[in-house]
Amino acid sequence: MEAGVFVVSAVVGLFAVASAVLGFIAEEKKLSPDDIDVSSGECEYPANAAFVLGICAVLLLAVAQIIVSSVAGCCGCCKPRAGASESRRVTGIVCCVFSWIAAIVAGVSFVQGAAWNAPVTRDTAPLCYYLKDGVFRRAAVLSLVAAVLGIKSYIMLRAAAAIEPKPDGQQPQQLAPAAAVATGYPQQYAYPPQGYASNQQFPAAAAAAPDQLYGQGPSTQYPPTKGYGEV
């Protein structure tokens, strides 16, 4: 894994885990029916740690989502890509969309839980409402799901961008003959190979007898021997 991917994943995961931990703690600290006082026909909700924990949790979740969406290019929509990596890009966009859906549901649950644990007085006596169980817990789990989907979206979109062809349509340059030999590609010659004469370059040689061209003419080193004829 590249250093940049590791850093982004670690930061986003850290914020998401912190948000989830605060959510689980808020679930244990939330107001119960016994904590609510009834005075003069009003329900008085005392100060509670779940209110602050819920606000901090939703802020951490928002920061995590903003970071992972920014580095991923706004879910891949700010820089649309196409080509061989189209399938990875679509997968990254789908993960990003579901990540935001989970984050929004988690954020609403955090805000709902914090609102019902705020230190206020409500004129609802003798019926005093309180937060049911599982709201903060659901938000904590969804914050982790949102972070996992966001990181997966970032990795998929980054991988799609890595194998994307150049936008200007330029193709890789042709290898030089020396580079072609070094890389194992066949070398093409634009001139006759060494050792072979061209008729255009040597017209006198082309007009010579074929046996003189190929070295089969009379030899001066070994003169011809006497011949015998029948009369």
Image (cartoon, rainbow, N blue to C red):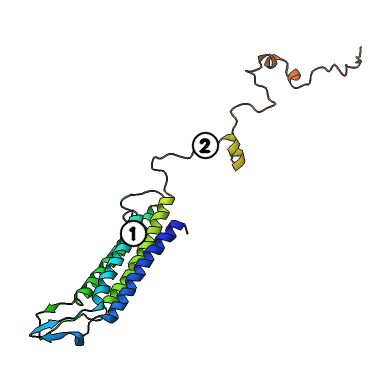
* Identity of the residue drawn at 32% across and 58% down: 69
**Foreground residue, 18 or 202?**
18
Secondary structure under badge 2? loop
Considering the image in quadrants, where does the C terminus appear? top right
* Identity of the residue drawn at 46% across and 57% down: 3
Residue 142 appears anywhere in the view: yes
**Foreground residue, 156 or 39?**
39
Quadrant in the rendering for residue 207: top right
Q: Which mark is residue 67?
A: 1
* Identity of the residue drawn at 68% across and 17% down: 206
Residue type of the residue flagged with mark 2? Gln
* Identity of the residue drawn at 64% across and 18% down: 201
State the image coordinates of residue 9 (x, y, percent, origin top left): 40, 62
**Which residue occupies the extreme bottom position in the image?**
34
Residue type of the residue flagged with mark 1? Ile
Secondary structure under badge 1? helix
Quadrant in the rendering for residue 153: bottom left
State the image coordinates of residue 154 (x, y, percent, origin top left): 38, 58
**Residue wearing tag 2:** 174
State the image coordinates of residue 90 (x, y, percent, origin top left): 35, 56
State the image coordinates of residue 189 (x, y, percent, origin top left): 60, 30
**Foreground residue, 197 or 158?**
158
* Within-10-Å neighbours for mark 2: few <14, some 14–19, many 20+: few
Q: Is tag 1's residue or tag 2's residue first in the polypeptide sequence?
A: 1
Rendered view: 152 above or below 27: above
